[in-house]
Each structure stands twice: as structure tokens, then as C-alpha cells.
Image (cartoon, rainbow, N blue to C red):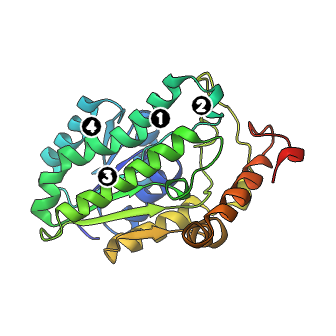
């Protein structure tokens, strides 16, 4: 990774921040995008790397995405890796959810990936580089109470799989990485039914895979030019396996698992399967 130019969206916290640290350790040249540019600058100072480019970026805005890509190319003269990591979540039943929540989640998660990919693709094709999208196990199975989130992650997977096939003979590498539940701020800032921020996580963050471990595995997958990466066994690989061969059982297990969250929007335990 020495000398590789890497763009990471959503780099101010969680997996994105951990990815920035991992790539920095490996000698990459970093371009970091996030809405909270002050936190990007703090990370730049923490890493002690004055060459890191920090660009205030709201990936839901097409012009912001273009500016991130343009500034990266202007500074470094090439782009080797784009990691579409920026994302938001939500927590509400679809029946109760304001449709604006669906739009906001899709704008950030799906269209943010589309915009950044569109503007970076010519440079990635020129470098025969890597295009990566960080989805979630929610991109393989529908998570009840996370309708918009799952829909956006399924959409990203379909989009990137198609980009891979379109450029099958161009040398472009496309990775779809699906972490399981990973410790981060994503649940803290998840949207509720009316679009307000949840404010606290309903899960024990300490029991989850760390963002640092997740980032290490993602960087290794990019290094090996893998097409997909599914992290964690029970919530990840085993769930995807069940979805292929015992989908009805997976539906029941998923419902019961998500219903156990504190203040779950799902039915009470007496109504679970």
C-alpha cells in the first residue's frame, strides 16, 4: 500500500477512522472525507501526517462528492483506492416511519456511493485500482426495524456487483465488504421514525468486533483483491448460509434477535415466533 492514493468517506469515526489509521500505517497517501471536518483535522494531527488531505464532504450532495474526488486528484495526481464507507442508520418499523427517513438514508448510503464512484471511476480505471463499498450483513438479510438501512445496503451491493461485471476486463477491482455488528457511532446517530437522532445505542458496543479489527480485515481484502468479505461467523457467514438454504428459519431467528433489543420497535416477546 506504500504510495497508494486512498480516498475514505465517513472517515471521522468508526470503521472509516480505523481504515485511515490502518492505511496510514502501511504508507498510503490519504484523502479523507466527512461532514465533521474538525474531526478529520484532529485525526490528521493524531497521525502526525501533514500530507493527509481533509475535505468536508456530505456524500448526499453530488457537488461535495465531486469536490472530494477533484481535490484528491489535484493534490496527488492519481487515485488508487476509493472506499465508500460513509453511512447512516435508522431504527423504526416501516409502517411508523416518515418517508423522509427513507430518502435521507438512501441519499447518504446509496447515492453517496453512486456519486463518489461516478466521479472517481475514470481515475480508478486508469490505475487499475480498487473500488470498495462497506455495506453490512443488512445488505444480505432484511433487518426488521432497519428497513431503510437494509434497503440501502442491498442497493449498494447490487450496484457494485454490476460495476464489477461491467468492467470485468478492465483491471478494476471491486470489493463489497459486509461487517457484522461493529463498535462505532452509527447506532448513536441512527434516525428514529420521525427523523430525529436516536442519541444512544441499543446494543452493547463492547461485545462487538472492534472497528480496528474490521479495518484490518478490509485492508487485507483490498490487498488480496477479493470480491467480497463477510465478517463475523454467527451474525455474518452463518446468517448468509442460512439465507441460502433455510430462509424461513433465518427470518424467525432474525426477528427474535432484533426484538430483544432494548425498546425494540418490534412486537413484544410474547408475539415472537
Q: Residues within 10 Å of mark 3 (few under 14, many from 20)?
A: some
- Distance between the alpha carbons at the discs numbered 4 and 1: 16 Å
Name the quadrant of the N terminus.
bottom left
**Residue pointed to by mark 2:** 191
Question: Residue at (60%, 42%) from the top-left corner?
Answer: 146
**Given this view, does label 3 or label 1 mark the residue nearer the observer?**
3
- Looking at marks 3 and 1 on the same chain, the residue that comes earlier in the sequence is marked by 1
Q: Nearer the viewer, mark 4 or mark 1?
A: 1
Residue 173 in picture, x, y percent from top left: 25, 67
218, above or below 9, in the image: below
Residue on which disc 3 sits: 159
Q: Which residue is mark 1?
A: 105
Of mark 4 and mark 1, the one earlier in the sequence is 4
Can residue 114 be seen here? The reply is yes
Asked whether the beta carbons under mark 2 and mark 1 sit within 8 Å of each other, the answer is yes
Which mark is nearer the camera, 4 or 2? 2
| Cα–Cα span, label 3 and label 4 | 17 Å
Mark 3 or 2: in front is: 3
Secondary structure under badge 3?
helix
Relative to 71, 183 lies left or right: right
**Towards the viewer: 20 or 88:** 88
Which residue is denoted by mark 4 in the rendering? 65
Where residue 96 appears, x then y in whole percent? Answer: 65, 26
Q: Secondary structure at mark 1?
A: helix
Distance CA(mark 3)–CA(mark 1) = 16 Å
Where is 192 relative to 143, above or below?
above
Compare marks 3 and 2 and give the one earlier in the sequence: 3
Amino acid at each position: 500500500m506504500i504510495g497508494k492514493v486512498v480516498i475514505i468517506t465517513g472517515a471521522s469515526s468508526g470503521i472509516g477512522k480505523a481504515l485511515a489509521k490502518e492505511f496510514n500505517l502501511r504508507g498510503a497517501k490519504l484523502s479523507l472525507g466527512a461532514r465533521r471536518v474538525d474531526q478529520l483535522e484532529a485525526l490528521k494531527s493524531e497521525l502526525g501526517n501533514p500530507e493527509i488531505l481533509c475535505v468536508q464532504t456530505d456524500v448526499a450532495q453530488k457537488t461535495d462528492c465531486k469536490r472530494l474526488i477533484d481535490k484528491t486528484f489535484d493534490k496527488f495526481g492519481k487515485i488508487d483506492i476509493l472506499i465508500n464507507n460513509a453511512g447512516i442508520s435508522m431504527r423504526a418499523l416501516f409502517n411508523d416511519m416518515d418517508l423522509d427517513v427513507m430518502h435521507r438514508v438512501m441519499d447518504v448510503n446509496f447515492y453517496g456511493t453512486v456519486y463518489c464512484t461516478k466521479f472517481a471511476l475514470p481515475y480508478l480505471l486508469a490505475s487499475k485500482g480498487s473500488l470498495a463499498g462497506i455495506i453490512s450483513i443488512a445488505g444480505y438479510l432484511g433487518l426488521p426495524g432497519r428497513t431503510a438501512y437494509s434497503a440501502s445496503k442491498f442497493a449498494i451491493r447490487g450496484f457494485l456487483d454490476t460495476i464489477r461485471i461491467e468492467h470485468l476486463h478492465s483491471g478494476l477491482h471491486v470489493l463489497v465488504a459486509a461487517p457484522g455488528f461493529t463498535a462505532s457511532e452509527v447506532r448513536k446517530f441512527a434516525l428514529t421514525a420521525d427523523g430525529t437522532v436516536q442519541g444512544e445505542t441499543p446494543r452493547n458496543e463492547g461485545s462487538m468486533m472492534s472497528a480496528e479489527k474490521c479495518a484490518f480485515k478490509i485492508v487485507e481484502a483490498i490487498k488480496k483483491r477479493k470480491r467480497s468479505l463477510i465478517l463475523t461467523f454467527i451474525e455474518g457467514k452463518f446468517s448468509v448460509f442460512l439465507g441460502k438454504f433455510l430462509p424461513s428459519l433465518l427470518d424467525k431467528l432474525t426477528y427474535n434477535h432484533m426484538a430483544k433489543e432494548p425498546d425494540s420497535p418490534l412486537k413484544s416477546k410474547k408475539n415472537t415466533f
